[in-house]
Amino acid sequence: MSSTASGKNGTWRNWGGNVVGRPAREVTPASVEELSAAVRRAAEDGLKVKAVGTGHSFTSIAATDGVLIRPQLLTGIRNIDREAGTVTVEAGTPLKRLNMALAREGLSLTNMGDIMEQTVSGATSTGTHGTGRESASIAAQIAALELVTADGSVLTCSEKENPEVFAAARIGLGALGIVTAITFAVEPVFLLTAREEPMPFDRVLSDFDELWAENEHFEFYWFPHTGSTNTKRNNRSAGPAKPVSPVAGWIEDELLSNGVFQAAQLVGRAAPATVPAIARVSSRALSARTYTDIPYKVFTSPRRVRFVEMEYAVPRKAVTEVLRELRTMVDRSGLRVSFPVEVRTAPADDITLSTASGRDSAYIAVHMFKGTPYQAYFTAAERIFTAHEGRPHWGKVHTRDAEYFAGVYPRFAEFTALRDRLDPDRLFQNDYLRRVLGA
C-alpha cells in the first residue's frame, strides 16, 4: 500500500485511522481538463465532490460519499521563474518531492512544517505550518493559485487577480473549489543550524519571550508527567554544512524517535500505569545536538509512529498561561499521556481563515498514540484552548462549529459570502464543512 491513506472495497481511511469514508466513485484525473469534466459530471449525477491528498488530516475534511478525487497524477513542477522567485507546482505534488526538486534547483521554501508526506494542496488547504518568528505557514508563501470551481471552470487568483478569492483560497478547506496548481514564493537555498537541547519546562515558560525573540524558528516538546522539555532552535547560518552523521541520524530519528518510541507507546497503551515512568525515560533519551544543513533536512523529520492529534492556535501572549493550565489539568486528571505536547509559533498573516489570521499566534498540539482513547484528554485540553479564544487547526481533531468560528475569526462572514458566490449549490460540501462553515 502506498503512503496515501486508503482502504479496501471502496472505503477510504485517513493516515490516523480515525476517519473512514465510502465514496460512490473515485476519479484520478490526469489533467485539469479531466478534473473539470469530473466535477461537471458529478454535478449532473447529483453527487458531492471532495479531493483528498495523503489523508494526513485527523478531521473528516476530505471524507465524502460522493466523488472522491485523487490527485496523484497531477504532480510535478510546471514552471520555475527565477527572476520572480516563484515555482508553480501541480496540486497533488507531495511536499517531499517539491522540497527535493527545489533543492536540486538550488531553491527552497522559506519555512515548512515538520512532516512532508502531505500533498501541497492538502497541506495548504488545511493551514499546515511550522514555527517561525517572521516566517509564516506554507499557505502564507503562496503567490498565486489555480482552482476548478463548482461549474467546472478554472479560476486563477493572486494579489492582483481575483484578490478576494486569493485572500480566502490559500486556506480554502476544500470549500471554494479544487486546487489544481499552486505558485509558491521561493528563495535561493540556504543553510540552517539546528540546536536541540533539553530544558526544564519552567525555564522554557519563564524565558519564552526571549527564546522566541532570539531565534528565527523556536519550538519545544514537553513530556507530560515530567518537568522536562526538548527545545529546538533553527537559525540561518553562513555554513559550512555539518549534517547529522548517518549513524547518529539513524539512532536519533529512526531508533529513538520512531522505533523505541513506537515500542514505548505500545507498552503505554497496554499498561497505562507505566506511562509516567516511560515519559521520564523518553524525555531523557534525546540528548543535545547541533547540526547545519539545507532547510528541509532541518525542518522536517520522518513520523512513523501513528497518532491522533488536536492543535489549537492561541494568541502568542497567552501561551505560557495556557501551558500552565494544561500541566495542572494533566496532573489533576489521572490521565496518562504518553505523547509529548508540541509548541510552535507563527506571525500574524492576512489569510481569511488562517489560524494566525490577524494575530501573532502560538500553537499547542496534543497527541495520543493511535488506538489509545483520546477523547477525555482532548476534551479537557480543548476546554482550556477555547477559554483563550483558541482556533483549531482545520485538519486536526476538534469539536467547534460555525457559531464558534464566527466569534474567533473576524473575517468569517467574508469567507462564507465568497463560498456562496463560488459554490452556491454546495457541490463541495460534506459533513465537516456543514459543521464548521454552516449550511
Image (cartoon, rainbow, N blue to C red):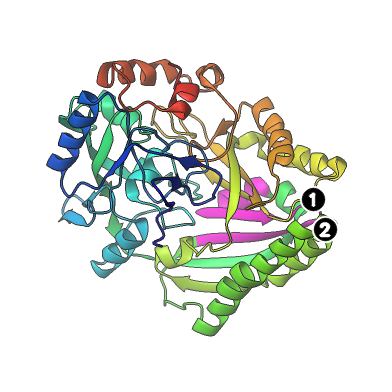
Q: Is residue 216 magenta?
A: yes
- In depth, the one of 119 and 270 nearer the eye is 270
Residue 372 vs 45, above or below: the answer is below
Q: Nearer the viewer, residue 362 or 26?
A: 26
Q: Is residue 135 above or below residue 267?
A: above
Determine the residue positioned at 44% across, 51% down: 7
Is 64 or 143 nearer to us in this picture?
Answer: 64
Quadrant in the rendering for residue 159? top left
Quarter of the figure that contains the N terminus:
bottom left
In this view, 108 is above or below 348: below
> Helix, strand or loop at disc 2?
helix
Magenta residues (range): 208-234
Q: What's the residue at 77%, 59% (across, down)?
A: 270
Q: Which residue is mark 1?
A: 336
Name the residue type under label 1.
Arg
Is residue 5 left or right of 382 when viewed as pictured? left
Indicate which disc, 2 or 1, sits on the residue closer to the N terminus: 2
Query: Can I make out residue 338 in this image?
Result: yes
Residue at image point 41% right, 15% down: 413
Q: Residues within 10 Å of mark 2 (few under 14, many from 20)?
A: some
Point out residue 22 in the picture as x, y percentages from the top left corner: 42, 39
Q: Position of residue 373 (x, y in %)?
A: 70, 45
118 falls in the magenta region: no
Amino acid type, callout 2: Pro
Q: Which element type, helix, strand or loop, lies under badge 1?
A: loop
User: Which numbered circle lies on residue 241?
Assistant: none
Q: Position of 165 compared to 52: left or right?
A: left
